[in-house]
């Protein structure tokens, strides 16, 4: 089966948002991150998602980050911009902005906090898809949004909305992923680094990765190996990456650990914004051990 969103196959990296010490945007460093991912062979970058601390960015900052990433990408790497909101009107506005800025796609999280019905999810995404002619990637993460978009709803959205092309699957349920893959033409992307290989084995096409901020070449190598038919090599990469993904990302709320890891590796992207807080001393020591055990050169 030819899937609708294969343009987003491979490695997409959920970009952190660099900050100065005072918490303001570090635009120069954001541009450097894009260049670094071009050099690393990353297929797509995803600004202003969960990892990009979108809940604490102002509307102006959100748009500014999208604009900078699209400008710096300059066609060298795809951009899937976070445009989701629990307000349908806001999702439409942000998606229009992303399209005008030159983004290749919009990553739209399921409406959070207000807990729509399944009909509400359908009507929300249909309203956006009807208004904006940009490829849309659904982002289903009930652990953060408080409600699951059921597979039947996701497939219904896909059927009704030709420009809904993929789903970032972050439920942790292989059954849910299987249902979507069996009943729709959507491209399915892993939203959990540790589950990327299992999802690929079901027919998934790639990952929107947090660990890709740290080791993009390695995550891409795993995905590429599997998609080229070398399952044994893909398993080797999975087992190497698994402790890093599990131990780093379980220390605290994303993106606290990944920003701390980048600082330890000489790629400091500044602090997280409140209400997120830094790792404790014990957590930081555990992170150092995890990075060293992976074979990375830790500073300090």
Image (cartoon, grey):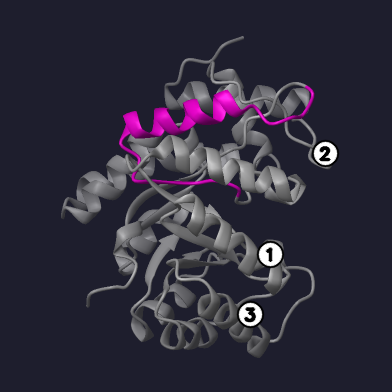
Label of residue 124 in the image = 3
Mark 2: which secondary structure?
loop
Residue 263, quarter of the rendered image: top right
**Position above or below: 1 against 37:** below
Residue 253 visible within the image: no
Q: Position of residue 88 (x, y in %)?
A: 68, 73
Q: Distance between the residues labelled 3 and 1?
A: 10 Å
- The tag on residue 274 is 2
Q: Residues within 10 Å of mark 2 (few under 14, many from 20)?
A: few
Q: Is residue 27 magenta?
A: yes
Q: Residue at x 62, y 36 (%)?
A: 17
Q: Position of residue 136 (x, y in %)?
A: 47, 68
Q: Which of marks 2 and 1 is in front?
A: 1
Between label 2 and label 3, give the one nearer the viewer: 3
| Count of all numbered marks drawn on residues in the image | 3
- Report the Cα–Cα distance between label 2 and label 3: 29 Å
Camera-side residue: 83 or 217? 83
The residue tagged with tag 1: helix, strand or loop? loop
Describe residue 101's horizontal placement relative to residue 287 as left or right.
left
Q: Earlier in the sequence, mark 2 or mark 3?
A: 3
Percent coordinates x, y for residue 231 in the rendering: 21, 53
Asked if residue 98 is among those painted magenta in the image, a careful observer would answer: no
Question: Residue 85's mark?
Answer: 1
In 3D space, how far apart are the residues under numbered discs 2 and 1 (Cα atoms)? 20 Å
């Amino acid at each position: 089966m030819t899937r609708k969103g294969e343009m987003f196959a491979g490695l997409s990296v959920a970009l952190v948002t660099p900050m100065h010490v005072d918490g303001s945007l570090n635009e120069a460093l954001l541009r450097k991150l894009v260049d670094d991912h071009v050099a690393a062979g990353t297929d797509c970058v995803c600004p202003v998602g969960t990892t990009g601390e979108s809940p604490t960015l102002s509307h102006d900052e959100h748009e500014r980050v999208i604009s900078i990433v699209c400008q710096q990408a300059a066609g060298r790497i795809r951009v899937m911009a976070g445009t989701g909101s629990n307000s349908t009107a806001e999702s439409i506005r942000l998606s229009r902005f992303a399209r005008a800025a030159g983004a290749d796609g919009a990553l739209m999280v399921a409406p959070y906090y207000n807990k729509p019905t399944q009909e509400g999810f359908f009507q929300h995404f249909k309203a956006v898809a009807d208004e904006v002619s940009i490829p849309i990637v659904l982002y289903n993460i009930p652990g953060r949004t408080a409600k699951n978009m059921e597979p039947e709803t996701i497939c219904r959205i896909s059927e009704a909305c030709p420009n809904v092309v993929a789903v970032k699957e972050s439920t942790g349920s292989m059954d849910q992923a299987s249902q979507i893959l069996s009943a729709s033409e959507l491209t399915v992307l892993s939203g959990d680094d540790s589950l990327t290989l299992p999802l690929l084995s079901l027919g998934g096409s790639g990952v929107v990765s947090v660990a890709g901020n740290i080791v993009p070449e390695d995550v891409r190598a795993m995905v590429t190996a599997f998609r080229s038919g070398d399952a044994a090599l893909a398993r080797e990469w999975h087992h190497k990456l698994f402790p890093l993904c599990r131990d780093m990302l379980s220390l605290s709320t994303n993106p606290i650990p990944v920003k701390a890891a980048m600082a330890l590796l000489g790629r400091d992207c500044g602090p997280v914004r409140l209400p997120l807080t830094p790792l404790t001393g014990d957590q930081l020591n555990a992170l150092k051990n995890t990075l060293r055990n992976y074979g990375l050169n830790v500073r300090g």
